[in-house]
Image (tube, grey):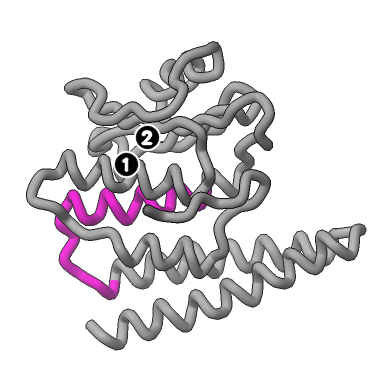
Amino acid sequence: MHENAPPNELPTAERWLNACLRVAPREDPKQTLIAAAREVRALVGADAVAVQTPEGTLLSQGNTAGPSWRTGEGAAATARRTALPAVVAGGAALVVPVGLLPGRVHAVILLARGETRPPFDRMSSVLVHSYAAQVAMVLDEWPAVSEFADSLLELVTTAGVTLAGAAELAEDPRVEGRIRAALTSLDRSVALIREFTGDH
């Protein structure tokens, strides 16, 4: 069992990276999708998760009732068509496609948080979508580890640049401190990626 992310925080960049590096194909692609959904639920501390494919629902855990969840289900069709994630229902639901291109989406992962929980934000969407991209690469049988690592490096670098800019704008020293800590974690993540590449 993976430890859930704190209810008002995202996972550390190192923990997210390790989750990405654990992505591996299973004999049944459906089991790969189910394992991925459980992983992202733990990473972002979602109260509910489901995996929807064109053939039907593979997994449904937690409270999947209510207007927020129905809004997420409606957004899943768009995510499947566009291969783009979306935060909907005022941040109560997150919809993430497992697929790199429109027309090649294997499934859509729906995540939700209860009314008393902090809403999902754009960074939540970025993290889950980047993880889902690694899952899609495995399902599509991308063979090149270098491409896998390059993709991760690009995502981590982009996140670092975004966080650095946010730190400069932060007026609350506590917020700036947390952003600086996240940047340090990202630096460690880059080292992990390079170590992973060097081992393969």
The residue nearer to you, when weighing 180 against 103, is 180
Q: Is residue 43 above or below residue 73?
A: below
Name which quarter of the figure residue 167 lies in. bottom right
Task: Give the numbered dot on residue 98.
Answer: 1
Q: Which amino acid does label 1 sit on?
A: Val
| Marks 1/2: CA–CA distance | 7 Å
Q: Which residue is drawn at 56% across and 31% down?
A: 113
Front-lying residue, 155 or 124: 124
Q: In which quarter of the image is residue 119?
A: top right
Left or right: 10, with 108 as reference point: right
Q: In this view, does 123 lie above or below 75?
A: below
Location of mark 2 (residue): 109
Q: What element carries label 1?
A: strand
Going from N to C along the chain, the mark reached first, 1 or 2, is: 1
- Observer able to see residue 81: no
Above or below 184: residue 10: above
Residue 17 in view in this figure: yes
Q: In this view, does 133 lie to the left or right of 84?
A: left
Q: Do the residues labelled 1 and 2 touch (CB within 8 Å)?
A: yes
Tell me where the magenta segment starts and ends, as one range: 126-146
